[in-house]
Image: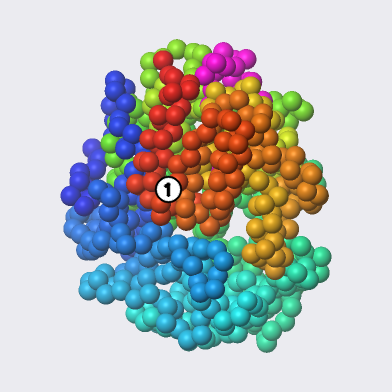
């Protein structure tokens, strides 16, 4: 028996049951998850969660054993992104909103960190009133270290009102809105690393214009310990401080064909050595660190994740936890300071994902909450991993979600390429895939070349292949399903967001006879304009332009080549009707991209519909606009590729 806890007045228990007959309402999928972020207190006795209900976002702190609520606060005025404990008495809430600085040409996503005293509900926005802050602070809420004993957080922030502000390191008391300068950065500084006492350990600089990358050690003055003078993009990714705080860890791709990412150690004397964290069968997808960013473990990629931790006891506890859920997706989130309680999210494919605390002393799994409400176990569709051959022989991994209805193959099909493009789809509760499956569609999520998670060579194989081999991989996945008798070739739509939106439009441009409808959410239509926007807004200072040039065109940015892979240039060949959906506050892919596609299709006499989302960013961050998106897609897809 599981103990049932009360969360914000709702009873939550592990859901079990038979397959339901009627699909849940659209709103059950489109609304924000009931719990969008969660953290465990240092003593393991309480949890903090961002809870979304009835169109509001609530910040909640609750005792795990008794169910007593320590804090209930409405935080709906901003877009809450994450919450974490600072000691036992404070929370730190990360939130953002879309804004525009004075004299700026484009909007940007402002982020900040807000401290909340749990007992009094007193709030302070950290660093907010620090003198001489640069007016455009997209990352003001970033924290690089915490010192709970002295009530201090350590945060970088841009200083100065010029076009080339400096990134300084600040110390900020947890209950104050301004900080004091600890170290001065330069206009090229991009990150800081600190020790447990807040003293600077290292500084990371990147000058994209001059292609110079440097790491400075602050142990004995300021000494360059790593330098690259041919760096058009940031060449390595610093991820953690070493356990003994005498060096840094970074992730870099191996140079041999088929190599996978490895974790390297850079000592503060400049010595580089390879660790044994790398695996031949998986990438290192993320790392776990403590409050001072010291390494605690790594998470490996895969259709379901796996882990390796520095502490042997923690590793044994995580192994036991995963063994108790064979075949399930188990996402380790955090743990108590004594490592006796572990917070995780699990998805077994039979019910929606749930949050649990594993109590290692008793061996019990304490359920905290389902991640979402209103979707019975019988309506959760089965997702499986598949592989298929691309036309050039490369093996493409994918996720396939079967219809959650009693229909028979061949099924109406949704091809749903992911965004990024350097991300990947895995076995998990995907709200959009599950929605389409609940309406009777088979959903294919191809991890085309250029996706991360499947090795350095697989990701690099996507360089310069937008609209070419990457798109072929998507098409080949559809052909595979048709050949297997699973997909009905007369009822196929392609749906995607961000890069996936580009891939959807590219499907209409380059394989116009394959799809019965096309849905692009915040997608790119004009590749040359995408690069031009980046060139105009950022230049080469941060390396983002060079990165885009590499992945889009493998460095060959000849306009004819870019036009050749831009769907907006092929409006005349589109056959399937198109639905464009775009947030007006999108700061990643400007809505102009969809406006140009809409205009080109209309001028060509093609069927197109355009939904503009007021107040929405690139990520469909609000439940209201997610629901509006699903409504538009549901009606559109049913009209052009009706389910049985």
Asked whether 419 falls inside the magenta stretch, the response is no
* Residue 42 at x, y percent in the picture: 36, 65
Indicate left or right for 527 with 599 as reference.
Answer: right
Q: Is residue 525 above or below residue 574?
A: below
Residue 251 picture quarter: bottom right
Query: Foreground: 191 or 270?
Result: 191
Residue 394 visible, this angle: yes
Indicate left or right for 378 with 128 as reference.
Answer: left
Asked whether 476 falls inside the magenta stretch, the response is yes
Residue at horizontal 34 percent and vertical 68 percent from the top: 91
At mark 1, the secondary structure is strand
The total number of labels drawn is 1
**In which quadrant is the N terminus drawn?**
top left
Residue at horizontal 60 percent and vertical 36 percent from the top: 603
* Residue 623 at x, y percent in the picture: 35, 47
Q: Is residue 490 above or below residue 536?
A: above
Query: Foreground: 546 or 52?
Result: 546
Residue 382 visible, this angle: no
**In which quadrant is the C terminus drawn?**
top left
The residue where tag 1 is placed is 613
Residue at horizontal 57 percent and vertical 51 percent from the top: 592
Numbered range of the magenta stretch? 475-498
């Amino acid at each position: 028996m599981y103990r049932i806890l009360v969360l914000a007045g709702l009873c939550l228990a592990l859901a079990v049951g038979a397959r339901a007959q009627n699909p849940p309402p659209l709103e059950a999928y489109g609304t924000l998850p009931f719990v969008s972020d969660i953290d465990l207190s240092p003593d393991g006795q309480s949890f903090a969660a961002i809870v979304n209900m009835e169109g509001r976002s609530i910040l909640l702190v609750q005792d795990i054993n008794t169910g007593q609520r320590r804090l209930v606060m409405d935080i709906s005025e901003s877009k809450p992104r994450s919450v974490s404990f600072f000691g036992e008495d404070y929370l730190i809430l990360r939130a953002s909103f879309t804004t525009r600085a004075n004299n700026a040409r484009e909007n940007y996503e402002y982020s900040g960190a807000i401290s909340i005293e749990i007992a009094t509900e007193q709030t302070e926005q950290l660093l907010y009133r620090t003198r001489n802050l640069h007016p455009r602070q997209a990352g003001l809420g970033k924290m690089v270290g915490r010192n709970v004993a002295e009530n201090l957080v350590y945060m970088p922030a841009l200083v100065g009102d010029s076009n080339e502000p400096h990134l300084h390191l600040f110390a900020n008391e947890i209950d104050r809105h301004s900080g004091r300068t600890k170290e001065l950065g330069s206009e090229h500084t991009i990150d800081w690393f600190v020790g447990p006492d807040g003293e600077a350990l290292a500084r990371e600089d990147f000058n994209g214009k001059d292609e110079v990358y440097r790491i400075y050690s602050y142990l004995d003055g300021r000494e360059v310990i790593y330098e690259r003078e041919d760096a058009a993009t940031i060449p390595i990714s610093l991820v953690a401080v070493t356990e003994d705080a005498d060096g840094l860890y970074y992730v870099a791709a191996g140079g041999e064909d088929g190599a996978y990412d490895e974790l390297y150690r850079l000592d503060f004397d400049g010595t580089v050595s390879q660790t044994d964290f790398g695996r031949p069968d998986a990438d290192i997808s993320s790392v776990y660190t403590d409050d001072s960013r010291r390494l605690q473990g790594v998470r490996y990629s895969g259709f379901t994740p796996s882990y390796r931790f520095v502490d042997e006891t923690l590793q044994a506890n995580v192994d036991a936890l995963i063994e108790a859920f064979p075949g399930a997706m188990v996402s380790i989130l955090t743990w108590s300071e004594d490592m006796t309680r572990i917070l995780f999210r699990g998805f077994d494919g039979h019910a929606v994902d749930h949050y649990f605390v594993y109590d290692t002393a008793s061996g019990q799994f304490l359920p905290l909450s389902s991640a979402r409400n209103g979707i019975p176990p019988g309506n959760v569709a089965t997702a499986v991993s598949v592989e298929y051959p691309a036309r050039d022989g490369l093996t493409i991994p994918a996720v396939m979600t079967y219809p959650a209805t009693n229909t028979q193959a061949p099924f109406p099909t949704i091809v749903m390429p992911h965004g990024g493009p350097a991300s990947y789809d895995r076995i998990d509760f995907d709200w959009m895939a599950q929605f389409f499956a609940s309406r009777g569609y088979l959903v294919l999520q191809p991890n085309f070349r250029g996706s991360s998670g499947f090795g350095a060579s697989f990701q690099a194989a996507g360089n310069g292949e937008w609209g070419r081999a990457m798109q072929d991989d998507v098409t080949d996945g559809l052909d595979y399903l048709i050949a297997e008798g699973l997909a009905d070739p007369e009822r196929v739509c392609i749906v995607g967001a961000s890069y996936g939106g580009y891939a959807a439009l590219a499907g209409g441009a380059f394989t116009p006879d394959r799809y019965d409808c096309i849905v692009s959410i915040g997608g790119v239509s004009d590749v040359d304009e995408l690069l031009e926007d980046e060139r105009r807004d950022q230049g080469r200072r941060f390396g983002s332009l060079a990165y885009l040039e590499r992945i889009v065109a493998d460095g060959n940015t000849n306009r004819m080549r870019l036009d050749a892979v831009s769907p907006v240039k092929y409006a005349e060949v589109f056959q399937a009707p198109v639905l464009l959906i775009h947030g007006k506050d999108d700061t990643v892919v400007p809505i102009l991209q969809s406006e140009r596609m809409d205009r080109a299709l209309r001028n060509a006499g093609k069927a197109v519909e355009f939904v503009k989302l007021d107040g929405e960013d690139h990520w469909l961050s609000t439940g209201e606009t997610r629901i509006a998106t699903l409504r538009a897609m549901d009606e559109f897809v049913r009209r052009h590729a009706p389910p049985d």
